Amino acid sequence: MAKSDEQLLDFDKERLAHWDEERVARALAGENGAIYRNHLEIAQWIDGWIERMEEGDVGRRTPEHQRGLVAGVREIAAHLRQTDFVPDGDLLRD
């Protein structure tokens, strides 16, 4: 079952460096709305993966490596949520 926009946008926006409500509204209403919704779902999956990773044994990773990995993966989720990867998004422009 597809998630509502409200469910997809249910995350801590204070953690995002470039959150822009107007840009998000345009992305959701525009021709690439389905792509952006998919990005939001991916970001939610990433959040869950990070939570599971943090709860589990870090294995052979050092605490510094673990923190760096978590920070890097959270950065990817942030870019997905900020519309940076929709067609003509900030990170896909030439």
Image: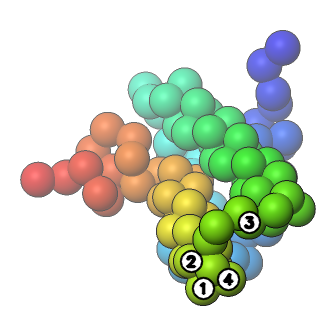
Mark closest to the chain's N terminus, 1 or 3: 3
Between the C-alphas of marks 3 and 2, the distance is: 9 Å
* Along the viewing direction, whichever of 15 and 63 lies nearer the viewer: 63
**Residue 40 position in % (x across, y down):** 64, 42
Name the residue located 62 percent from the left edge and 39 percent from the top edge. Answer: 42
**Residue 60 position in % (x across, y down):** 64, 67
For residue 15, side relative to residue 29 (left or right): right
Name the residue located 11 percent from the left edge and 53 percent from the top edge. Answer: 94
Secondary element at image label 2: helix
**Residue 62 position in % (x across, y down):** 63, 80
Looking at the image, the residue that sits furthest to the bottom is 64
Q: Tell me, yes or no, whether the two marked residues, 1 and 4, touch with CB atoms within 8 Å.
A: yes
Q: Tell me, yes or no, whether the two marked residues, 2 and 1, touch with CB atoms within 8 Å.
A: yes
Q: Which residue is mark 4?
A: 63
Q: Which mark is residue 64?
A: 1
Q: Which residue is mark 3?
A: 58
Mark 3: give few (<14), some (14-19) or many (20+) Cα within 10 Å.
Answer: few
Q: Which residue is mark 2?
A: 65
Q: Tell me, yes or no, whether the two marked residues, 2 and 4, touch with CB atoms within 8 Å.
A: yes
Numbered-mark total: 4
Residue 74 in sight here = yes
Secondary element at image label 3: loop
Between the C-alphas of marks 1 and 4, the distance is: 4 Å
**Residue 17 position in % (x across, y down):** 55, 79
Residue 55, picture quadrant: bottom right
Between the C-alphas of marks 2 and 4, the distance is: 5 Å
Name the residue located 69 percent from the left edge and 77 percent from the top edge. Answer: 15
Q: Tell me, yes or no, whether the two marked residues, 4 and 3, touch with CB atoms within 8 Å.
A: yes
